[in-house]
Image (cartoon, helix red, strand yellow):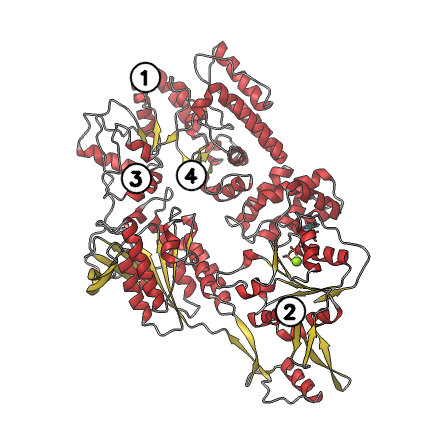
C-alpha cells in the first residue's frame, strides 16, 4: 500500500490509443474506471502518469486474497496507552481526494470488494462502520481497479454487479515500433538492440496459451534491456530477464533459448 | 543395369553405415518438442502438428540415381499442409551431431516463415529455385542470429552434396548455380536447364510437396481405394479418418524403377514408398495381410492413384472389442427414456443400459511415462484444492485474532458498545464437499490416430490416469465411467471406478484395458451417470463429460435428434442440482456444443495431446471457487 507524494515530473507513458482522454473524461465526470490487460502492459504506469498529469495524489493498494475490508477502510491501532483510529488507503483517498487504485482487484475476497460498491454508484459514499462515519467522496476522488483476465479461474472473476460499476479500458502490449520506443526511452538502450529485443518478445508472445502461460511482458523487456545496457552479455541477459521468468521447465527454457540464438547468433 | 545398381548400392550402404554418420544421427523424436516451440515462436502456425515425413518423390524421378542418390533418399524433405508440418524422421547428413540438429532448426525456421504453401507444382522448378532463395533471405533478415548457423550448414552441405556424383556440363552448371544460391541467397535468378531436374536441396523447402487427399474430393474420383468403406459408416468422422492414415497422393512409380525401389525397401525397411494399390493379380489373402501390416507399421500410407488399377480394396478392420469373459455385469436392462424433439415427447423406457466392469485380474501400475507429470499435477492440485487459510473472527481458535482484538479494544475505548466479539483465528483448509463423476466417450471414433503412436483412446486413457492420480490426494470423491452404444438396446457402460472404490491397482488395470467401442448415445449415458451422481451426499456434484464428437448412433440418433436428446439430458441433470461440464476435442464442435451444454458449459481442447495434462487443471479450475 502506498501513497505517492506529488512530484512535478510526469512519468513517461506512451499511449496505446485514446486512453488518456477517456481517463480524463471519466475523472471529470466522477466515473470509476476498470483497467484490464496482461501483466506488465503498462496499467500501473498509466495510472501514475495520469495521477501526475491530473495533479492528484495516488493511493495504490495491491489486492490479495487475505485483504480484509479493514485493510481498505482502516482500523484502530494501539499507541501510547490509547487506541487511535487509522484510516485505510481507501478512506484516506476519500477524505483527501485523489485516485485510489486497487491493483489486481479479483484477488480480493468478494466480501472486500463490496466495500467499494457505495463508492462506485452515484451516492459516492463510504460508510465507515467502526467510527460511525459516512464519508462523501469529493469531486477529485476517483476509484480505479485493475485486473488481468488471463489469470482468472473459471468460477473466479468479477461479479457482474461489481463489473458493471466501471468504465472499462483494455490494455495490451504495444505495437513493435512503439514498444521499441518505450524500451529505448526507459532504458537508454540503442535502437538496434531494442528492436531485436522487441522482435524476440513478440516471438515469445506467439507461444501464449500453447506453450506458455503468459507471453513476455514489456516489463521483462525493460528489465532485460537494463541488464544489457549496463554491460551484461545480451544472451545471458535474455536468459535471465526474458526466458527464465516465463518457464520453469528445462526443455522449454532450452527451446526458448533457441529463439534467443535466432536473434543473437550462436 | 543390375550390376551398376550393385556398385552404387555398395557405396550407399557403406556410406550409410559409416560410423561417424550413424553416431551423429539426430531424430525428430529427440528434438520435436523444442523444435515445435521454436517453430511457433518464429511465426509457425500453432495448429500444425509436427510429424515425421517419409521419403517422397521429387522432380528428379526419371532416373533412379537421382532418386536415391546421396542424402536425398535418406533425408526426407520438409513441407507443410493444412494441419501438419512434415520434418525428416531423422537427420544424419553431417558427421557432426550439432550440424544435424542445426539443420532441424533451420528447417523449422524456413517452414515457420512459409506462411502459405502455394502448390509447388504451380511454382515449377524455377519458382522453387527463386522461392527458396527468397525465403532464405527473409528468414535471415528476420532472425539475423541464424546467419552463423546457416553459413555453417551451407559449408558442410556443399562439401557433401555431390560426393560420388558425376555430372555432365549442364548438370554441373545447375549444381554450380545451386551452390551459389546457397552461399549467396537471392543472387541467382535462373536455374540453368538440364535434361534432369537437380536433386532437392536439404536446406530448402520441398520442391513438390505431396498433396494430401481431401476425402471429400476423393469421393468424386473414380478410383476406390483403401479405408473408409470397411468401417461402419460414420460420416462426421471422415475428416479424422483422413488424418489418421495421412493418405497422400503420390504419383505411381513407373515400372522401370519398381525393381530398385523394391530392393531398396527390403533392405531398409518398409517406411518407404510402398505400392499398395491392388493391381489385378495380387488379390490373395496373404497379400492383404502383408498390406495390412505395412499399413500399420508405416508412418504414412501412400496411396497412389493409378488409373489402371482395378480398384481392389484393402480393409483395415478396426479392432472392435469382443465382449470378453473378464467382463462382469453389474447391472443390466436398465431402462431409460429418450427425448424425441420432433414429436416433443419423452419416449419412456426407450433405451437399455448394461453396466459392466472389466476385471482383468491384474494389478495395474501407472505407466512409466506418466509418472513425472502425475507427480507434478498431484502437487498442483493439492495446492489448489486444499488451500489452508486463517479463518478470522472465530469464536474459538488456536490463536488470538489480533486485528479483531484491537478493533474490539478500540471500539470499547472510544465508547462504542460491542456485543460478543469473535476474537480468535483458526488455520483451516477451505472446506470442499464435492463429488465428481467423469464420463468418458469410448466410441469408435476414439480409435482415430492422432499421431504416429497415439490414438484418441490412448490420450483418453492417459487422461483418466492423470485425472485419478491428481485427485487421489484432494479428498474429493470421484468415479469414472466410460460408455459406448450400438443402437438403443445396447448401451454399454463401463465402470472403471465407483465412488466407493479406492483408486488402486485394480482400477488402474481397468483403465489400462479400455478399448474403443461403437457409437455415442450420449443422452442415455448422461442420464445413467446422473443417477449415480445424484445420490452422492455432497454439496457440490460435478458431472464431467469427456468426448471427441457429436452424439450419434446407428439409428436415427444423429444430427439434430442426438443433439437435442443430449441437451435434454443435460437439462435434467442440472435440474437435479448437478453441475455439468463437457470437455471435447472436437474442434468442429463450435456450433452444437453451446446448444447442448450452454456457453460456459464446455471447453474445446484443440490439441488432444494436451488433454491428459489439461484435464486435472481444468478440474481444479472448475472446482476452486474463491468465495
Ligand atoms: N505504454 C507504456 N509507456 C511507457 N512505459 C510502459 C508502457 N507500457 C509498459 N511500460 C513499461 O513496462 C513496465 C511495466 O508496466 P506496468 O508496471 O505498468 O504493468 P502493469 O500492467 O501494471 O502490470 P501488472 O498487471 O503486472 O501490475 C513499466 O514500468 C514501463 O517501464
Ligand atoms: Mg501493475
Q: Position of residue B615 (x, y in %)?
A: 42, 57
Q: Is residue B499 visible?
A: no
Structural crowding at the residue carrying mark 3, measured as other residues with C-alpha within 10 Å and reported as few (<14), some (14–19) or many (≥20) = some
* Chain for disc number 1: B
Depth-wise, is mark 2 or mark 4 nearer the camera? 2
Mark 2 neighbour class, 10 Å CA radius: few under 14, some 14 to 19, many 20 or more: many
Q: Earlier in the sequence, mark 4 or mark 1?
A: 1
Q: Which residue is mark 4?
A: B83
Please tell me whether mark 4 sits on a helix, a strand or a loop: loop
Q: Report the mark closest to the observer, 3 or 2.
A: 2
Question: Can you say whether B325 is above or below B404 in the image?
Answer: above
**Residue B581 falls left or right of residue A174:** left
Q: Chain of mark 3?
A: B
| Disc 1, SS | helix
Q: Which residue is mark 3?
A: B296
Q: Residue A119 — which label? A: 2
Amino acid at each position: 500500500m502506498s501513497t505517492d507524494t506529488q512530484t512535478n515530473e510526469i512519468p513517461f507513458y506512451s499511449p496505446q490509443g485514446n486512453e488518456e482522454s477517456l481517463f480524463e473524461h471519466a475523472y471529470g465526470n466522477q466515473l470509476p474506471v476498470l483497467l484490464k490487460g496482461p501483466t506488465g502492459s503498462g496499467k500501473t504506469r498509466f495510472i501514475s502518469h495520469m495521477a501526475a498529469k491530473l495533479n492528484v495524489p495516488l493511493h495504490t493498494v495491491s489486492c490479495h486474497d487475505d485483504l480484509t475490508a479493514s485493510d481498505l477502510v482502516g482500523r484502530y491501532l494501539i499507541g501510547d496507552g490509547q487506541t487511535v483510529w487509522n484510516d485505510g488507503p481507501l478512506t484516506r483517498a476519500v477524505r483527501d481526494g485523489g485516485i485510489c487504485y486497487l491493483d489486481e482487484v479479483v484477488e480480493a475476497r468478494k466480501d472486500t470488494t463490496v466495500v467499494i460498491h457505495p463508492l462506485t454508484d452515484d451516492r459516492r459514499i463510504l460508510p465507515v462502520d467502526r467510527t460511525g462515519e459516512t464519508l462523501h467522496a469529493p469531486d477529485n476522488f476517483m476509484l480505479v481497479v485493475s485486473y488481468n483476465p488471463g489469470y482468472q479461474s473459471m468460477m473466479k472473476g468479477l461479479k457482474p454487479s461489481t463489473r458493471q460499476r466501471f468504465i472499462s479500458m483494455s490494455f495490451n502490449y504495444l505495437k513493435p515500433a512503439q514498444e521499441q520506443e518505450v524500451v529505448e526511452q526507459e532504458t537508454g538502450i540503442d535502437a538496434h538492440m531494442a528492436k531485436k529485443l522487441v522482435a524476440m518478445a513478440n516471438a515469445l508472445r506467439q507461444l501464449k496459451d500453447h506453450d506458455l502461460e503468459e507471453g513476455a511482458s514489456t516489463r521483462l523487456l525493460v528489465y532485460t534491456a537494463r541488464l544489457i545496457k549496463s554491460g551484461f552479455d545480451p544472451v545471458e541477459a535474455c536468459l535471465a530477464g526474458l526466458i527464465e521468468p516465463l518457464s520453469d521447465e528445462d526443455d522449454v527454457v532450452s527451446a526458448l533459448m533457441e529463439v534467443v540464438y535466432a536473434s543473437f547468433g550462436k | 543395369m543390375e550390376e551398376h545398381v550393385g556398385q552404387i548400392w555398395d557405396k550407399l550402404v557403406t556410406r550409410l553405415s559409416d560410423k561417424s554418420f550413424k553416431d551423429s544421427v539426430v531424430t525428430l523424436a529427440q528434438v520435436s518438442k523444442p523444435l515445435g516451440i521454436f517453430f511457433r515462436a518464429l511465426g509457425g502456425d500453432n495448429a500444425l502438428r509436427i510429424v515425421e515425413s517419409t521419403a517422397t518423390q521429387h522432380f528428379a524421378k526419371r532416373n533412379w540415381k537421382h532418386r536415391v542418390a546421396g542424402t536425398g533418399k535418406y533425408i526426407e524433405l520438409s513441407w507443410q499442409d493444412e494441419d501438419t508440418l512434415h520434418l525428416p524422421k531423422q537427420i544424419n547428413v553431417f558427421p557432426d551431431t550439432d550440424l544435424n540438429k542445426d539443420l532441424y532448426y533451420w528447417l523449422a525456421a524456413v517452414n515457420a516463415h512459409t506462411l502459405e504453401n502455394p502448390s509447388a507444382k504451380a511454382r515449377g522448378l524455377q519458382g522453387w529455385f527463386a522461392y527458396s532463395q527468397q525465403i532464405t533471405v527473409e528468414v535471415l533478415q528476420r532472425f539475423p542470429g541464424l546467419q552463423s548457423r546457416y553459413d555453417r550448414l551451407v559449408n558442410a552441405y556443399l562439401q557433401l552434396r555431390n560426393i560420388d556424383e558425376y555430372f555432365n556440363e549442364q548438370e554441373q552448371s545447375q549444381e554450380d548455380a545451386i551452390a551459389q544460391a546457397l552461399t549467396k541467397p537471392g543472387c541467382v535468378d535462373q536455374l540453368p536447364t538440364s535434361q534432369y531436374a537437380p536433386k532437392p536441396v536439404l536446406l530448402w523447402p520441398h520442391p513438390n510437396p505431396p498433396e494430401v487427399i481431401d476425402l471429400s474430393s476423393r469421393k468424386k474420383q473414380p478410383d476406390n481405394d483403401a479405408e473408409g468403406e470397411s468401417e461402419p459408416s460414420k460420416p462426421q468422422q471422415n475428416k479424422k479418418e483422413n488424418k489418421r492414415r495421412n493418405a497422400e497422393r503420390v504419383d505411381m512409380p513407373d515400372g522401370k524403377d519398381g525393381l530398385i525401389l523394391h530392393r531398396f525397401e527390403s533392405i531398409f525397411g518398409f517406411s518407404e514408398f510402398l505400392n499398395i494399390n491392388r493391381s489385378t493379380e495380387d488379390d490373395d489373402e496373404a497379400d492383404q495381410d502383408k498390406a495390412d501390416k505395412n499399413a500399420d507399421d508405416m508412418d504414412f500410407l501412400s496411396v497412389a492413384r493409378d488409373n489402371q488399377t482395378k480398384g481392389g480394396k484393402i480393409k483395415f478392420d478396426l479392432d472392435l472389442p469382443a465382449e470378453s469373459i473378464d467382463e462382469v455385469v453389474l447391472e443390466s436392462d436398465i431402462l431409460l427414456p429418450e427425448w424425441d424433439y420432433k414429436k416433443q415427447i419423452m419416449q419412456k423406457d426407450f433405451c437399455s443400459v448394461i453396466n459392466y466392469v472389466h476385471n482383468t485380474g491384474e494389478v495395474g501400475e501407472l505407466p512409466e511415462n506418466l509418472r513425472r507429470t502425475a507427480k507434478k499435477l498431484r502437487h498442483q492440485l493439492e495446492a489448489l484444492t486444499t488451500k489452508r487459510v486463517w479463518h478470522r473472527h472465530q469464536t474459538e481458535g488456536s490463536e488470538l485474532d489480533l486485528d479483531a482484538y484491537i478493533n474490539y479494544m478500540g471500539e470499547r475505548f472510544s465508547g462504542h458498545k460491542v456485543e460478543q466479539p469473535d476474537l480468535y483465528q483458526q488455520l483451516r483448509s477451505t472446506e470442499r464437499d464435492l463429488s465428481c463423476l467423469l464420463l468418458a466417450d469410448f466410441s469408435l471414433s476414439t480409435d482415430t490416430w492422432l499421431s504416429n503412436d497415439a490414438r484418441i483412446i490412448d490420450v483418453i486413457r492417459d487422461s483418466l490416469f492423470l485425472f485419478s492420480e491428481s485427485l487421489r490426494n484432494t479428498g474429493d470423491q470421484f468415479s469414472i465411467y466410460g460408455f459406448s452404444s450400438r443402437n438403443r438396446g445396447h448401451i454399454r457402460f463401463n465402470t472403471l471406478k465407483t465412488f466407493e472404490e479406492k483408486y488402486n491397482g485394480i482400477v488402474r488395470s481397468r483403465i489400462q484395458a479400455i478399448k474403443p467401442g461403437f457409437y455415442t448415445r450420449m443422452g442415455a449415458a448422461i442420464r445413467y451417470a446422473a443417477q449415480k451422481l445424484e445420490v452422492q451426499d455432497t454439496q457440490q456434484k460435478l458431472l464431467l463429460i469427456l468426448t471427441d464428437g457429436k452424439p450419434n448412433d446407428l439409428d436415427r440418433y444423429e444430427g439434430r435428434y442426438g443433439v437435442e436428446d443430449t441437451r435434454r439430458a443435460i437439462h435434467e441433470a442440472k435440474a437435479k442440482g448437478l453441475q455439468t461440464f463437457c470437455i471435447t476435442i472436437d474442434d468442429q464442435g463450435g456450433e452444437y456444443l453451446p446448444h447442448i451444454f450452454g456457453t460456459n458449459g464446455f471447453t474445446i481442447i484443440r490439441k488432444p495431446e494436451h488433454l491428459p495434462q489439461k484435464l486435472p487443471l481444468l478440474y481444479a479450475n472448475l472446482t476452486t471457487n474463491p468465495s
